[in-house]
Image (tube, rainbow, N blue to C red):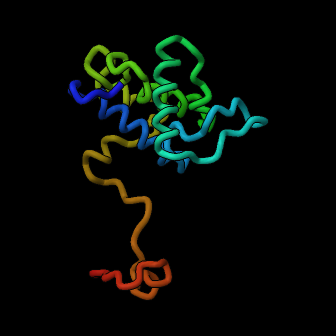
Amino acid sequence: MLSALQSHGRACDWWSLGVLAFELLFGRPAFSFGHGTDAAHPPAAPRTPKQIFASVLRYCQDAHLGRDVDHVFLPCRSDAQRAFLRMLLEPDPRARGGYGAQHGGHDVFVGSAFLADFDWGALVRQELAPPTFPPEQPEAAEAAGGAGLKIET
């Protein structure tokens, strides 16, 4: 639990990466899916930040007490995706994947099954093309909602 008297290090960074990855994958903040248990019991509608924070605290408390927290990961489409997010969203900072040599450091992140097909060497060599490109024509930029966007060629 966050406190003004505690310092936060890399474990907090890995948690934040997990929250960001969750939102990028599912289009909604982590912990905003409620407690749906399966497709027949869909998760609740998006909630307020205060309710999401309460869900984070409940998740951490439930995990600490050994209760089932799988409801958080219901949107996951594969075991690899679920394991990746669980590793980053581990409530105990000392056990969080990626944190410190005892938990594999960043190697546990880059070596995860979820990212197995990613070409890390190409990233380091700056050879990866971005997944999207801005429109090349000013008219196309306007049509895409970027009115007034100046495109340099």
Name the residue rendered at 31%, 47% in the picture: 123
Query: What residue is shown at x 38% (from left), y 18% (from top)?
Result: 92
Of residues 54 and 113, the one nearer the viewer is 54
Residue under the point 37% across and 59% down? 129
Number of numbered discs:
0
Q: Is residue 92 above or below residue 122?
A: above
Q: Residue furthest right?
A: 40
Viewer can see residue 148: yes
> x and y percent of residue 127 in the render?
31, 54
Nearest the eye: 60 or 40: 60
Residue name at image x 35 percent, y 54 percent: 128
Q: Position of residue 151 (x, y in %)?
A: 31, 81
Q: Is residue 83 above or below residue 125?
A: above
Regarding residue 9, the answer to whether it shows in the image is no
Q: Where on the picture, by quarter, is residue 77?
A: top right
Check the image and report above or below for 139 versus 124. Answer: below
Q: Is residue 81 above or below residue 142?
A: above
Q: Position of residue 1 (x, y in %)?
A: 36, 24
Instruction: From the viewer's perspective, tell me whether residue 122 is left or right of residue 45.
Output: left
Left or right: where 70 falls relative to 6: right
Looking at the picture, how far across and down is residue 9, in whole percent?
23, 28
Figure quadrant of residue 79: top right
Task: Name the residue furthest bottom.
Answer: 139
Q: Quadrant of the C terminus?
A: bottom left
The residue nearer to you, when weighing 106 against 31, is 31
